[in-house]
């Protein structure tokens, strides 16, 4: 869940920071350019004042007009040499009153020409387009009118290089980027803490629910930490687990007590049947049928008692040689297989260890191999293979019997369930349920699938590592 929640939080935080950082970066660039434009306007006002003296002298025919023009030219040259900014005062007909450098002219079109036309109309030119750090040849041209007696007689124009301004913008952007990166790291750390705080109770709940689902009925949740809603959920889960465990314990006790209490009356009943049989002709079919049903009922009661004990008892798991144990059980069942005309073969690894209760695993293998031999016709083969896959050791029993349908595969292993096609085969329908309970107590499992072209594959799996280890 964290793998899904954390990226979502990170994307949201990154989007928020970018939504804040992008306008901030644009505002910084605009502020730096506006600062340069304001400086140029102030410089233009000073040059406009000097130009007014020149135009006034020219209009009055004074002999000092040339001297004033020379003074203005000297100011522009010094200004250009000191700051590297081109500057000039141009008459309405584009002729230059003074300019530095001497070859500089106003552009014939584009933004510069528009600024000059606006200044001639008595307005300061509009702000030039924004210059960005990657525009290495960008220039800022600012034009201001020279007004004398209410008339625009000339225009002061400045064309500024943008290297320093672009450097300041770039430095500002780097500072913003560093600030955003630092904020993102802090936010990521906070998101980690937040997701841990929120999801840790959920993970604990998931582990406890999985434990109960796999038979560890004592799994509980420590109701500490996390949001109050999850703490209440933990309390409710523990109460539910207590109730479920109590109900299951009552059920197991009832099954055990009932099967135990029924054994004595059943034994007495069978004894009376045997005594009654002495009074009847030998070979009476009814007596034989009653004996068979009595023995079947005894087997059912024994299996019920075994099932109750298997679900109640804790497994005593240890490191076990699964290959050797499987070979031992195959050797024990081989005479019965030969009697039925079925080939019982053992393949796979001969020595592989896993953690299991040897007695429980032996009982489970006996039940599975017994079922496979019951349903495999004479002349066919039952293969028992041992393999190690990832963190489990698997003993696979594959037969060549009729197999099961998809619906039957979903029900196989349920208590008392037997396929409608095999009701004539001896059994109580509890053997696989007992095996599953015995394996689950030690962290093992029992699974079923069809074995093409026909037959059933039953997989007995136990862990390769100690389930009790941290």
Image (tube, rainbow, N blue to C red):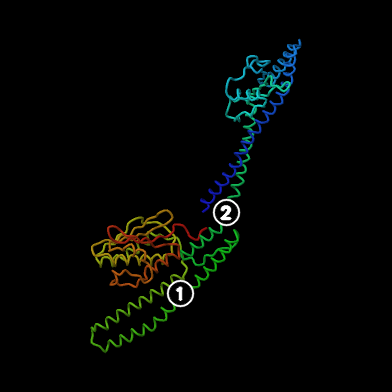
Q: Nearer the viewer, residue 256 or 360?
A: 256
The secondary element bearing badge 1 is classed as helix
Residue that carries the numbered disc 1 in the rendered image: 251
Q: Nearer the viewer, residue 262 or 112?
A: 112
Residue 193's label in the rendered image is: none
For the point 24% across and 84% down, which residue is it?
A: 284
Q: Is residue 469 above or below residue 30?
A: below
Residue 134, image x and y in percent? 57, 29
> How dense is the environment of label 1, judged by Cα within 10 Å: few (below 14), some, or many (20 and up)?
few
**In the image, is 418 to the left or to the right of 183?**
left
Residue 272, image x and y in percent? 33, 87
Residue that carries the numbered disc 2 in the rendered image: 196
The secondary element bearing badge 2 is classed as helix
Residue 26, image x and y in percent? 61, 36
Residue 270, image x and y in percent? 33, 83
Q: Is residue 349 above or below residue 187?
A: below
Q: CA distance from mark 1 to mark 2?
A: 39 Å
Numbered disc in front, either 1 or 2: 2
Q: Quadrant of residue 267?
A: bottom left
**In the image, is 332 to the left or to the right of 119?**
left
**In the image, is 18 to the left or to the right of 78?**
left
Q: Residue furthest top?
A: 63
Q: Quadrant of residue 239?
A: bottom right
Task: State the count of labels.
Answer: 2
């Amino acid at each position: 869940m964290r793998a899904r929640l954390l990226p979502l939080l990170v994307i949201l935080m990154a989007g928020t920071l970018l939504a804040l950082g992008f306008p901030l970066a644009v505002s910084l660039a605009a502020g730096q350019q506006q600062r340069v434009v304001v400086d140029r306007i102030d410089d233009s006002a000073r040059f406009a004042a000097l130009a007014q003296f020149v135009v006034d002298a020219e209009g009055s025919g004074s002999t000092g007009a040339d001297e004033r023009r020379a003074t203005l030219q000297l100011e522009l040259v010094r200004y250009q040499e000191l700051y590297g900014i081109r500057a000039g005062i141009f008459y309405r007909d584009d002729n230059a009153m003074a300019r530095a450098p001497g070859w500089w002219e106003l552009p014939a079109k584009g933004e510069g020409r528009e600024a000059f036309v606006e200044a001639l109309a008595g307005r300061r030119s509009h702000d030039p387009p924004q210059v960005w750090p990657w525009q290495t040849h960008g220039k800022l041209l600012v034009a201001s009118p020279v007004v004398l007696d209410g008339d625009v007689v000339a225009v002061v124009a400045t064309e500024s290089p943008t290297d320093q301004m672009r450097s300041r913008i770039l430095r500002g952007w780097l500072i913003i980027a560093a600030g955003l990166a630092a904020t993102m790291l802090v936010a990521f750390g906070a998101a980690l803490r937040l997701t841990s705080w929120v999801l840790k109770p959920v993970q604990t709940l998931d582990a406890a629910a999985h434990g109960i689902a796999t038979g560890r009925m004592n799994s509980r949740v420590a109701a500490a930490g996390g949001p109050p809603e999850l703490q209440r959920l933990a309390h409710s889960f523990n109460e539910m687990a207590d109730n479920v465990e109590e109900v299951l314990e009552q059920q197991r006790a009832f099954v055990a007590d009932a099967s135990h209490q029924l054994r004595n009356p059943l034994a007495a009943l069978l004894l009376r049947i045997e005594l009654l049989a002495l009074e009847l002709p030998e070979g009476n079919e009814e007596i034989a049928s009653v004996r068979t049903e009595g023995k079947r009922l005894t087997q059912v009661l024994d299996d019920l008692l075994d099932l109750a004990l298997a679900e109640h008892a804790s497994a005593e798991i240890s490191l076990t040689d699964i290959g050797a144990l499987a070979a031992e059980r195959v050797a024990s069942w081989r005479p019965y297989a030969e009697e039925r005309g079925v080939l019982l073969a053992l393949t796979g690894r001969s020595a592989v260890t896993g953690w299991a209760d040897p007695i429980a695993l032996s009982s489970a293998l006996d039940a599975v191999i017994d079922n496979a031999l019951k349903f495999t016709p004479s002349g066919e083969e039952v293969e028992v293979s041992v393999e190690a896959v990832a963190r489990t050791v698997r003993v696979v029993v594959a037969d060549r019997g009729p197999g099961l349908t998809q619906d039957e595969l979903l029900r196989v292993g349920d208590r008392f369930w037997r396929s409608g096609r095999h009701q004539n085969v001896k059994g109580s329908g509890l053997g696989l349920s007992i095996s599953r309970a015995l394996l689950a107590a030690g962290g093992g499992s029992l699974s079923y699938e069809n074995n093409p072209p026909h037959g059933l594959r039953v997989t007995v799996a136990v862990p390769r590592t100690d389930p009790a280890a941290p």
